[in-house]
Image (tube, rainbow, N blue to C red):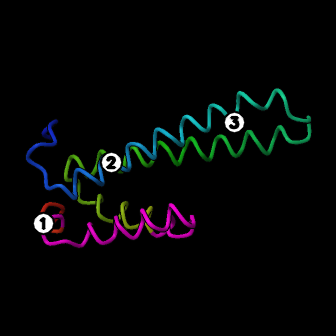
Amino acid sequence: MPDLTLRDKPMGVTFIIVLFTLMGLINIGTAFLTLKATGQLPWFLLPITTVASAVLFLIGIFQLFTAYTVWAKEPIAKVLVILFTVFGLLSFPIGTVLSIITLVILFTPEVKAYLS
């Protein structure tokens, strides 16, 4: 059972957990808001917005899962964080900045030791 507190984790790990939790919740919320707005769109956009909502929802779930794996010190956590940050580099400008910060933090000695 993972420790449910953040106080004994390095600051970089706490940053990654909070960042991925917030991103996951924002993506899930955006998915629901997009679905809610489909009633105001033309009929031919309905499949596109439905698929976009489903994709956003799944990305949000995987981001929450990534935050949990970092929290629980799962072996796959580092791979998932790197995967999301590499894709985040394409989200210019805010996603790029956050991804660069996350990658720098991920390779600091204390975070590397925590996740190894």
Crowd rating for badge 3 (residues with CA inside 10 Å; few <14, some 14–19, many 20+): some
- Give me the residue at 42% from left, 66% from top: 99
Which sits earlier in the primary sequence, circle 1 or circle 3? Answer: 3
Circle 2: residue type: Ala
Disc number placed over residue 34 in the picture, else none:
3
Marks 3 and 2 in Cβ contact (< 8 Å): no
Question: Mark 3 or 2 closer to N-term?
Answer: 3
Query: Relative to residue 66, is residue 106 drawn left or right?
Result: left
- Kindly identify the amino acid type of the residue bearing the numbered disc 1: Glu
Disc 1 packing (10 Å; few <14; some 14–19; many ≥20)? some
Residue 75 in picture, x, y percent from top left: 23, 59
Tell me where the magenta segment starts and ends, as one range. Answer: 86-111
Q: Quadrant of residue 35?
A: top right
Circles 1 and 2: CB atoms closer than 8 Å: no
Q: Secondary structure at mark 3?
A: helix
Secondary structure of residue under mark 2 = helix
